[in-house]
Image: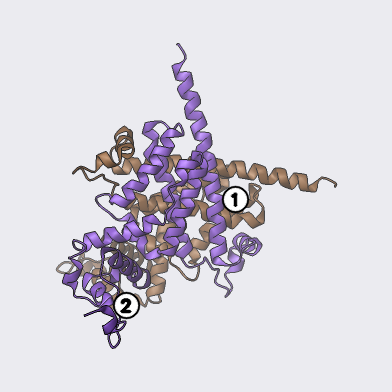
Chain colours: A purple, B brown
């Protein structure tokens, strides 16, 4: 029987063929809309209109599905910059891309940061960062430190972006915090997202700038250490 | 009947007198041990051995109890430094103290960062920071930006401290991420807490250093702007 004879699925919902990629995308969509806590394989199967057992034909259980979701999010983070830009610019571009991925998938943050054994997708990303820092001249013992400090800033900034804006209760509290009230009033951005963006951009610039200064010192002291005593 | 006649509560558990302070301390202890999600007034009352209604004689409902917990945590954060140190040193000392408070009360992080109307305790802390930055010469429109960027780094670092350590699956994944494996091996600190501390200290130093450089630029361009055209 030819496909043409049946028509294009007339009378039954047309459904894409189940695959590991489709499962991962649906799992991420589910986490994006319902939160990481709501995620379960039976509910994911329900969204896909299949039996939970069918998922196992493509991905080996919950941990594998979660890892495939991590991979999707990590794929949105640009590590290609490390191959083409000097480390300070690449680090800044990576941090921005990392934070933007978090911002698009705030509920996935928990999945990315709470992993007992390193996720292969995350490890591959770290590998790119560490490699570039080493090429940039950072000593081996400082690589994880630099990576972690920038990642902490990215993570905190992503949380700032999704947190409710700091508001001063209008019912008479402003007089108690006059400097803060004036500062909030003087801030050029009044929209929460624009303020978060400003804080991220400015803090990232400061952080990377400080790291450049730190590396220059490390190298100077290394050079001094190599002088004949 | 005099107190002496009754003895020191012999035959019944001796229990401190219920007060707003006691309720707040017990609520924080409960959140520290059981997590923020487990917190409820009936369970808090149970821990204190009183009826939930008794709590209302001291604190006006759940929001008031939560605010009293926030106040306890914020009281552990040292803002006195802003009165005695130059702003870069004060900012660094405050950030460290803030992160240490988070580290002692990781489950309280959610309470501190997810507040729709500014918590009075948090607002008072922000007031100290913003005031000191303004005295240090930061223009009014940049105060909230600087505050937020440092707070994001503190928050991300606190999460890094409580997150599981990044581990490379020993079963054969190290060869795929050789630079990362070497960097982890070369890091002087092998204990998770020591590594988190190193990343925090180093990143904080870089961030504050970058902010000092940013402020110098802002002042230079301000001064240039004031030159007669």
Left or right position of B23 against A59: right
Vertical placement of residue A33 versus B204, above or below: below
Label 1 sits on a secondary structure element that is helix
Q: In front here: A127 or B18?
A: A127
In front of the other: B30 or A73: A73
Query: Nearer the viewer's eye, disc 1 or disc 2?
Result: 1
- Chain letter for the residue marked with disc 1 in the picture: B
Q: Which residue is mark 2?
A: B54
Which residue is painted at 33% across and 75% down in the image?
B55
Displayed quadrant of residue A73: bottom left
The image shows residue B2 at horizontal and vertical percentages of: 26, 71
Left or right: A2 as drawn, with respect to A211: left
- On screen, residue A147 versus residue B2, left or right, reads right
Question: Share a chain, discs 1 and 2?
Answer: yes
Q: Which residue is mark 1?
A: B132
Which residue of the protein is positioned furthest toward the right in this rendering?
Answer: B229
Asked whether the viewer can see residue B192, the reply is yes
Q: Residues within 10 Å of mark 2 (few under 14, many from 20)?
A: few
Q: Please provide percent x and percent y for residue A190.
A: 61, 66
Q: CA distance from mark 1 to mark 2?
A: 41 Å
Q: Residue furthest left?
A: B11
Q: Position of residue B199 (x, y in %)?
A: 40, 42
Looking at the image, residue A54 lies above or below residue B199:
below
At label 1, counting other C-alpha atoms closer than 10 Å, the crowd grade (few under 14, some 14-19, many 20 or more) is many
């Amino acid at each position: 029987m030819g496909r043409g004879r049946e028509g294009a699925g007339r009378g039954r919902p047309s459904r894409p063929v189940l695959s590991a990629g489709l499962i991962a995308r649906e799992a991420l969509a589910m986490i994006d809309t319902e939160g990481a806590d709501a995620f379960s394989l039976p509910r994911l199967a329900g969204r896909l209109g299949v039996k939970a057992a069918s998922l196992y034909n493509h991905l080996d259980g919950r941990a594998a599905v979660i890892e495939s979701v991590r991979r999707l999010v990590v794929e949105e983070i640009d590590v290609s910059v490390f191959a083409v830009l000097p480390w300070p610019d690449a680090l800044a571009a990576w941090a921005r891309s990392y934070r933007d991925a978090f911002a698009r998938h705030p509920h996935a943050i928990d999945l990315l940061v709470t992993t007992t054994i390193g996720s292969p997708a995350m490890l591959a990303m770290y590998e790119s960062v560490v490699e570039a820092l080493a090429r940039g001249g950072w000593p081996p013992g400082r690589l994880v430190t630099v990576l972690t400090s920038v990642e902490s800033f990215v993570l905190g900034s992503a949380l700032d972006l999704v947190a409710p804006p700091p508001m001063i209760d209008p019912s008479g509290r402003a007089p108690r915090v006059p400097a803060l009230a004036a500062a909030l009033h003087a801030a050029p951005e009044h929209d929460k997202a624009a303020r978060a963006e400003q804080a991220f951009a400015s803090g990232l610039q400061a952080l990377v700038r400080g790291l450049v200064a730190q590396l220059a010192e490390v190298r100077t002291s290394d050079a001094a250490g190599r002088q004949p005593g």
